[in-house]
Amino acid sequence: MSHHDLIEAIDALLPQTHCGKCGFDGCLPYAEAIAEGEPINRCPPGGEPTLTRLATLTGQPEQPLAEPAQLPLAAVIREAECIGCTKCIQACPVDAILGAAKRMHTVITDECTGCELCVAPCPVDCIDLVPHPAWASAESDAERDAYLARRAELGRRRHRTRQQRQAREARDKRLERQKRLMQQRRGSASKGTSGSPGGAVIQRQRRMAFKAAEQALKRVQQQLESARRRGDDKAEATALAQLPEAERLLAEARSALDKSE
């Protein structure tokens, strides 16, 4: 089994709650760490069944769980007490909370993984954790297993969609910031030279624009390298699509900086 296949096989066994109790930012990073030798006993939502399957797959010995096993949970917002701060929305790793600033929030129960990450940020402590209704209403092991499989598939898909959205938003903010810096530089270009106080400001702005463009390109290259290492075709295509724009902005920033020096 290749390293990439091993990571995928490990990830397929994890519950996809993305709770961070393993010490990693999501189930996939933990799967990658296990493939490198990280202990397999750090997943409370997976419990003993997941521990046993991971031991069989990886060959690691079974150890006691680092934290007690956790039954499937769901978050419930006491809506009358909600102040609409959006902190729980920002914390949810699968975008399972609806709401807007200064408006009541509510949890989409079917999509909640019970990760608990929304509880601590709530400034008015209006979020409860309850047994997940789909788990509590299951009448057989087969129904419970079916629920866990649905939760894992949905949790994986929504978590990756959220990560892609956040990466896209962060990239757009960086590009917008770089464009503003370059516009400021162009607008100030006629007001002085590098030998005057105004020229020194322009030169500093150009250096800042160059550094920001350089960092943006480096991030895209790192994302591309990571995607290729994981064998993630979608992430690789996204990074490849971002690469020309990042290279163009860096070239423009370098050209402007060279002219000022």
Image (tube, grey):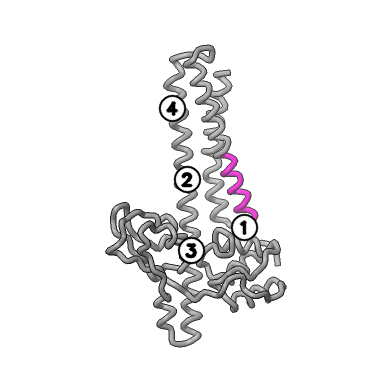
The tag earlier along the polypeptide, 4 or 3, is 3
Residue drawn where x is 64% and y is 61% of the image: 32
The tag earlier along the polypeptide, 3 or 2, is 3
Furthest toward the bottom, the residue is 140
Instruction: Classify residue 87 as left or right of residue 210.
Output: left
Residue drawn where x is 45% and y is 23% of the image: 186
The amino acid type found where label 4 is placed reads Gln
Dot in front, 3 or 2: 2
Alpha carbons under labels 1 and 4: distance apart: 38 Å
Residues in magenta, as a range: 217-230
For disc 1, the marked residue is 231
User: Is residue 181 located in the magenta-colored stretch of the structure?
Assistant: no
- State how many labels appear: 4
For disc 2, the marked residue is 170
Instruction: State the image quarter where residue 114 is shown.
Output: bottom left
Place of residue 135 in the rendered image (x, y in percent of width and height, measured from the top left): 44, 79
Q: Which mark is residue 157?
A: 3
Query: Marks 3 and 2: CB-CB under 8 Å?
Result: no
Q: Describe the element under mark 1 as helix, strand or loop.
A: loop
The amino acid type found where label 3 is placed reads Arg
Q: How crowded is mark 4: few (under 14 residues within 10 Å), some or many (20 or more)?
A: few
For disc 4, the marked residue is 183
Alpha carbons under labels 3 and 1: distance apart: 16 Å
